[in-house]
Image (cartoon, rainbow, N blue to C red):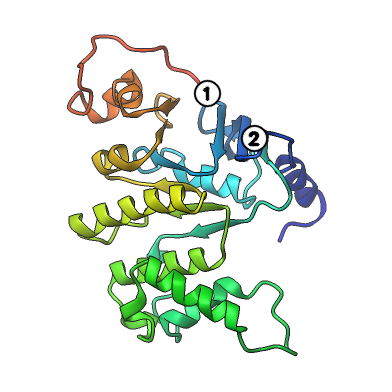
Amino acid sequence: MANGEHGAEQAASHATHPHKPDLLLCCEDLVIGYQGQALLPPINLQVHRGTFLAVIGRNGSGKSTWFKTLLGLQNPVSGRVYRSSAQVKSAYVPQTSAIDGMLPVRSRELVHWGRLTGWNFLRPFSKREDRQVVDSALETAGAGPIANRPYRELSEGQKQRALLARVLATEADLVLLDEPTAAMDAVAERETMRRLAELARERRLAVVVVSHDLRVAAEFADQLLFVDREAPAVVLGDANTVFCHPAFRHQYGDDYCPRHPSSGPTLGPATG
């Protein structure tokens, strides 16, 4: 937890801001970086309920730094992250490598941790409502069959499903996932991304995913956010807008762009 001057800066950068009802998160001229040094141009975007945003870019491009800034784990160089209200609840799913693989708990217990806000030693056991939410989250994430298996015995793909179920159990409004399909085969990866897109629509969540599979991300996401520390550039838009941008083509070539343009829009900050 932040304290002192650092805490005051975090509070300022994560203030609430009045917007239309379906808006959950807003980045306004947000510059991310370390020790006052910017990694990327300013980011301007809005994250609404019922939408699925995929974040793409090479390793080291700034994706994880942006996530940390959204979560309040790192201060921005400048600009602001606004939540539409103090009641907006967010949840984060790290890569499975960030979770201790020897964690001595069953998958169900790991998911139940997502319900422990306000836990009280006078009421140490879960209420019926909590158990129902956990069961529903496990089934929705495709983790029902592994609910009673030790987490440390699961495959990487199964661990990711358990972590997704844990996020669903929080009943969060905004869900941030860092490469949730990294350890999955192609079939499981596509199914997971499809399910995330459905959850965003069905539950009116905002889902933000870091992904390295560009084509799958383009198929299911409403928008793509491409970040490139080298250019530097930030591009927000649909697949054609992003894939045909010169900064993207410089990193990935022309194969993703359907029109192979000889020129594209000027590099600059994202808007949305």
What's the amino acid at mark 1? Thr
Q: Distance from label 2 to label 1 (Cα)?
A: 18 Å
| Residue 225 position within the rendered picture, expressed as x and y whole percent measured from the top left | 42, 34
Instruction: Name the residue at 75% across, 90% down.
Output: 122
Q: In which quarter of the image is residue 156?
A: bottom left
What's the amino acid at mark 2? Val
Instruction: Name the residue at 74% across, 42% down.
Output: 16
**Residue 99 in view (yes/no):** no
| 4 sits to left or right of 2 | right
**Which residue is more in the foreground, 237 or 203?**
203
| 63 sits to left or right of 69 | left
Q: Which residue is identified by label 2?
A: 77
| Residue 263 position within the rendered picture, expressed as x and y whole percent measured from the top left | 29, 9
* SS at mark 1 in the image: loop
Q: Which residue is identified by label 1?
A: 271
* SS at mark 2 in the image: loop
**Which residue is more in the foreground, 30 or 193?**
193
**Which residue is more in the foreground, 129 or 79?**
129
**Residue 118 in view (yes/no):** yes
